[in-house]
Amino acid sequence: MLPLPTSVCIQPIQLQALSESPLVSVLMANYNYAAFVADAIQSVRGQTYSNWELIVCDDGSTDESVNKIEQLTKQDSRIRLISKPNGGHASALNAAYAACTGGVICLLDSDDLYLSEKIERVVESFRSHPDCGMVAHRVIRVDRKRRKQGTLPLMAALPEGWCAPQTLASGGILGPLPPTSGLSLRREIADYIFPVPCERPLHYAPDQVIMRLAPLLTSLARITELLAEYRLHGNNSFETGRVTVASISRDISVNAELWKVQRRFLSRFMPASAGMLTPFETSSYGLFLRYLKGKLSSDPDVRQYHRELVVDLKSRPETLLSRFWVASVYLPKFIFEASANLILRQNKLKQLAAWLSA
């Protein structure tokens, strides 16, 4: 590993020059996705960039996954299968990373697909941004049958450049970033991040850990093109259809644990910067989630949560959306819930608005 800065002013680490045609390691974790995994693997085989290896870690599947993966390993020597007892998405991704050798790391969920120029465009981006150790691109949301359902992110622009200061100030949160299949790393950065935590509730969210740690280490490059399909089929580990008390409680729990991971990471590698990380509970997102949960659960302290949220909102430029949240405390619960889902979840109206704006 390269040495990290120790000054209070956090700085990106220096990256080595990337070779002309680097080996790209595609990491895939699979668990009982026999219906999708062959399509995912074939999408890698169909890439315009040929210098890649695909490491598939099967996490103790009980369906036909292993048979399907093995058939494809026999057809292409660039594909390797690792099998292990079930331990969760994060543990499988760790095993795949331990076995890979590439200088560029691309991630692919076994129910997603790459578009044909994905790897080529990622390598081009790393080469044209030699100071960037992470590349993110937009993905297409599709249903089980690959029918399009918008994009991720839908309307907001991906972050780019050196984002560590704003990440620290926001309680460790940088967004909007795509899910797993839209993220790629230089190996120098990945070596600091892997192995990712496997403990609950982060055992199924390794991409979230990567999103939280990589921006503390390196500048980000973004690709505006859509280069992968993110499949929603009803059994996704993290995607939820509606905003509910349960989904918000889970978000609060996951975000609190991610903050602890960031704090430990900073304390280990950049101790002078650890104190710059705003506590999640007092961050804008933390205050918002607490109010949202309080309103939906009819918490008797919701007015206090709302007052604290309003103070935070008024410290930033006013928008139409911020005005809504300021006034939302007076809405009946059923109208508030419907409005929150309209604002916070993707729907056909927002997809149409994004298409028109584009």
Image (cartoon, rainbow, N blue to C red):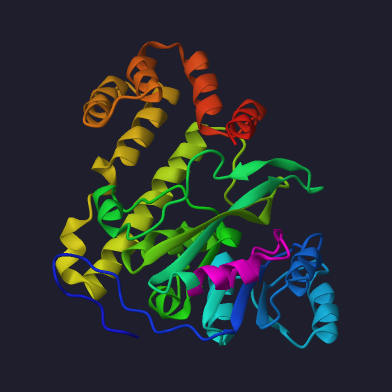
Query: Quarter-wise, where is residue 60 in the image?
Result: bottom right
User: Can residue 88 be seen at all in this image of the molecule?
Assistant: no
The residue under the point 38% across, 36% down is 289
Q: Is residue 119 magenta?
A: yes
Is 264 situated left or right of 236 in this image?
A: left
Residue 266 versus residue 64: which sits nearer the camera?
266
The residue under the point 68% across, 79% down is 54
- Looking at the rendering, the stretch of residues picked out in magenta corresponds to 106-127
Query: Quarter-wise, where is residue 301 in the image?
Result: top left
Residue 163 versus residue 74: which sits nearer the camera?
163
Q: Is residue 169 magenta?
A: no
User: Can residue 175 be seen at all in this image of the molecule?
Assistant: yes
In the picture shown, does residue 325 fall above or below 195?
Answer: above
The residue under the point 47% across, 16% down is 333
Q: How many marks?
A: 0
Q: Quadrant of the N terminus?
A: bottom left
Q: Position of residue 240 (x, y in %)?
A: 59, 41
Query: Quarter-wise, where is residue 115 in the image?
Result: bottom right
In the picture shown, does residue 201 fall above or below 130?
Answer: above
Q: Quadrant of the C terminus?
A: top right
Q: Position of residue 327 (x, y in %)?
A: 35, 14
Q: Position of residue 266 (x, y in %)?
A: 25, 67
What residue occupies the far front of the structure in this picture? 128
Q: Position of residue 102 (x, y in %)?
A: 56, 84
